[in-house]
């Protein structure tokens, strides 16, 4: 008989800042009874322009903080941290760790297309994480990648449906569109917020792959025999609470974020 054990411990979700709330939003829709503890390392973002060693150190600090606060699972919502630090996080954590790269790759492969493009921060693209995961899971599709450093500030400005974003997207996507890309993986927490502009520029024949719901599938798989008995509450820990965070958080969650606390992370 399959014995199910209820857990009241929250799911930990970690991002460099506010963008990971797009992943939290998908997780809450999928698991409304779960409690969540979201950590945004807002004092040290962006991660996307930093070296692998620095991102690894920051991510380990964040994971330790969430473990000390009793999470039963760690979702690394930040693509840059997933790209640079997932093995280190898995080795250092006593709870299961779920990153965003493999779920995003699986969602793209499920489309059965032959030409896949990856959009991400400089760090994510430089790490080659999406390219190598795609090659490891299915060597058939061709893959090309583009770093899109201006997308994060445009998303944070709330310009997801804006002529300036269209123009920037045309610049970044031009080589991929010339190559007749069939699916674009949105390999950054912020890019789902740019969907209206990206859809317009990419056109109706290109699939936009947002890994958030694929991450929810991966979380469901890692639950195993543990089911939820949480309160459904969301607690948000930030390393810096600025008006900026609150404004963008409200935009993503479509509600003011509750239970907010400023924290200092343990150093590795
Ligand atoms: N969260 C980061 C990511 O998904 C984007 C923002 C940053 O550069 O810190 O890669």
Image (spheres, rainbow, N blue to C red):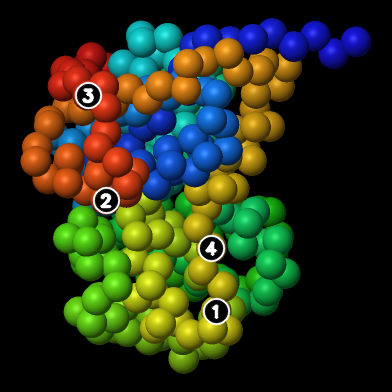
Task: Name the residue carrying label 2.
Answer: 251
Quarter of the image for residue 78 reads top left
Q: What element carries label 2?
A: helix
Q: In which quarter of the image is the N terminus?
A: top right
Q: Is mark 3 on a helix, strand or loop?
A: strand
Mark 4 vs mark 2: which is more N-terminal?
4
Residue found 50% across the figure and 58% down from its top: 210
Horizontal side of residue 211 vs 257, given as left or right: right
Task: Name the residue carrying label 3.
Answer: 260
Mark 1 vs mark 2: which is more N-terminal?
1
Residue 265 in sight: yes
Tag nearer the camera, 3 or 1 = 3
Task: Name the residue carrying label 4.
Answer: 209
Residue 12 in sight: no
Quarter of the image for residue 218 reads top right
Q: Residues within 10 Å of mark 2 (few under 14, many from 20)?
A: some
Tag nearer the camera, 3 or 4 = 3
């Amino acid at each position: 008989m399959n014995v199910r054990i209820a857990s009241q411990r929250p799911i930990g979700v970690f991002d460099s800042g506010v963008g990971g709330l797009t992943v939290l939003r998908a997780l809450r829709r999928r698991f409304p009874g779960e409690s969540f503890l979201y950590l945004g390392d807002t004092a040290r973002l962006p991660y996307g322009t930093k070296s692998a060693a620095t991102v690894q150190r920051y991510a380990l600090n964040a994971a330790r903080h969430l473990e000390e606060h009793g999470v039963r699972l760690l979702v690394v919502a930040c693509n840059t941290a997933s790209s640079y630090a997932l093995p280190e996080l898995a080795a250092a954590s006593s709870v299961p760790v779920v990153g965003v790269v493999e779920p995003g790759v699986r969602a793209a492969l499920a489309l059965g297309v032959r030409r896949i493009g990856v959009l991400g921060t400089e760090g994510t693209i430089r790490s080659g994480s999406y390219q190598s995961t795609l090659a490891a899971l299915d060597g058939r599709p061709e893959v090309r990648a583009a770093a899109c450093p201006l997308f994060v500030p445009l998303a944070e400005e709330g310009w997801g449906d804006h002529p300036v974003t269209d123009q920037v997207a045309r610049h970044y996507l031009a080589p991929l569109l010339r190559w007749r890309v069939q699916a674009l993986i949105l390999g950054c927490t912020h890019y789902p917020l740019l969907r209206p502009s990206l859809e317009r520029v990419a056109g109706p024949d290109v699939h936009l792959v947002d890994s958030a719901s694929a991450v929810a599938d991966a979380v469901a798989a890692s639950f195993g025999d543990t089911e939820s008995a949480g309160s459904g509450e969301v607690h948000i820990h930030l390393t810096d609470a600025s008006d900026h965070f609150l404004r963008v958080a409200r935009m993503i969650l479509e509600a003011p974020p509750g239970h907010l606390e400023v924290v200092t992370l343990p150093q590795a």
